[in-house]
Image (cartoon, rainbow, N blue to C red):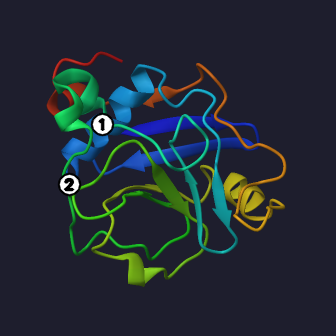
Amino acid sequence: MSVLIVTSLGDIVVDLHTDRCPLTCKNFLKLCKIKYYNGCLFHKVEKDFIAQTGDRTGTGAAGESVYKFLYGDQARFFDDEIHPDLKHSKTGTIAMASAGENCNASQFYFTLRDDLNYLDEKHTVFGIVEEQEGLETLTRINESYVDSEGRPYKDIRFVPILWVYVCKTVKEVTGNMEC
């Protein structure tokens, strides 16, 4: 399953690991469906490291999982889905940005270079951007001018309403969610 993310700097197609990380992918897809990420900023860009987003406040200090909307505040976070074979070895890896073990919510990041293996088994890797499906957009993000906190001087946003999912077996992954 893939998701097309339209940003102010170009498109990114993410191939999701729905079979390996069903909770994480369900969270991501349902947040996409309810337009949670529309207008979200890339609030942190660290050159040749990561580009982080998913906090609607644009500060990096907030976020909640879709499970909070379904089950209340006690479900703001959900558990890690760590698999030793899902690595941060390629540019374009997408993983959950969490504040600690089993503290996943809405924030995630893209890797901006290969071989960030020291992040392995610390963050849930749940997808990858393939070579012709948005790496040029990630290169543009990586080349953005940022302040001392990593915040881009020119906002990089998700363009509203233009999330497109390509689903093969949606019910298997997301329950009753329709595309």
The residue positioned 15% from the left and 31% from the top of the image is 172
Q: Is residue 160 above or below residue 108?
A: above
Instruction: Evaluate whether residue 166 shows in this view.
Output: no
| Quarter of image, res 34 | top left
Quarter of the picture holding the C terminus:
top left
Q: Is 170 left, or right, of 167 in this rendering?
A: left
Q: Position of residue 90 (x, y in %)?
A: 50, 72
Alpha-carbon span between mark 1 and mark 2? 14 Å
Q: Determine crowd level at label 2: few under 14, some 14-19, many 20+ residues with C-alpha closer than 10 A.
A: some
Q: Is residue 20 above or below residue 148?
A: above
| Quarter of image, res 121 | bottom left
The residue positioned 60% from the left and 74% from the top of the image is 113
The type of residue carrying mark 1 is: Asn
Sequence order check: which comes first, mark 1 or mark 2?
2
The residue positioned 31% from the left and 72% from the top of the image is 122
Q: Position of residue 103 (x, y in %)?
A: 27, 54
Quarter of the picture holding the N terminus:
top left
As rendered, which of 75 and 1 lies closer to the eye?
75
Mark 2 highlights which residue? 20
The type of residue carrying mark 2 is: Arg
Number of residue marks: 2
Q: Position of residue 131 (x, y in %)?
A: 59, 60
User: Cβ–Cβ below 8 Å for labels 1 and 2?
Assistant: no
Q: Position of residue 98 (x, y in %)?
A: 37, 58
- Callout 2 secondary element: loop
The residue positioned 77% from the left and 57% from the top of the image is 140
- Callout 1 secondary element: helix
Mark 1 highlights which residue? 27
